[in-house]
Amino acid sequence: MELKNFMEDVVLAKMDQVLDQYPDCCRCEQCRRDIAILALNHLPAHYVSTEKGEIFTRVQAMSFEYEVEVIQQIAKAIEMVSAHPRHEKKA
């Protein structure tokens, strides 16, 4: 049985859209991973194990409130990672 947190796909799909609003944010793989992890840790997990479950979750993900919450959590994560990157700031 394969388990999948559908929220990972949602966060990764929205991340570039939100990052476009933060042109000074580092976009290296480390920072992108940290942003995704922080956002996911503050969002409810939506695990699916079947195609039917994934379709149902995709329909839920289309709601406006759901999308707003995802965008808000990504934005908060970007601000945290930008303030405290886990690498030297580039000159």
Image (cartoon, helix red, strand yellow):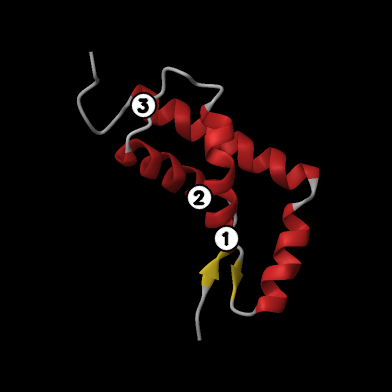
Q: How far apart in space, not on screen, are marks 2 and 1 (Cα)? A: 8 Å
Residue located farthest toward the bottom when viewing the structure as drawn? 1
Kindly state the secondary structure of the residue where label 2 is placed.
helix
Seen at 42% across and 29% down, the residue is: 80
Q: Quadrant of residue 20?
A: top right
Q: Is residue 42 visible?
A: no
Residue located farthest toward the top when viewing the structure as drawn? 91
Q: Is residue 16 left or right of residue 64?
A: left
Three-letter code for the amino acid on which mark 2 is drawn? Leu
Residue 17, horizontal then vertical, whole percent: 59, 33
Q: How far apart in space, not on screen, are marks 1 and 3 (Cα)? A: 26 Å
Residue 54, horizontal then vertical, whole percent: 67, 70
Three-letter code for the amino acid on which mark 3 is drawn? Cys
Residue 59, horizontal then vertical, whole percent: 78, 60
Seen at 38% across and 31% down, the residue is: 27
Pick whichever, 43 or 63, lies toward us. 63
Q: Are marks 2 and 1 in contact (CB under 8 Å)?
A: yes
Q: Is residue 91 left or right of residue 15?
A: left
Q: Which residue is mark 1?
A: 45
Residue 12 versus residue 22 in the image, above or below: below
Instruction: Tell me the quadrant of the picture where the C terminus can be found.
Output: top left
Three-letter code for the amino acid on which mark 1 is drawn? Ala
Q: What mark, if any, has residue 70 been given in the picture?
A: none
Residue 60 versus residue 84 in the image, above or below: below
Q: Quadrant of residue 30?
A: top left
Kindly state the secondary structure of the residue where label 3 is placed.
loop
Q: What mark, if any, has residue 26 been given in the picture?
A: 3
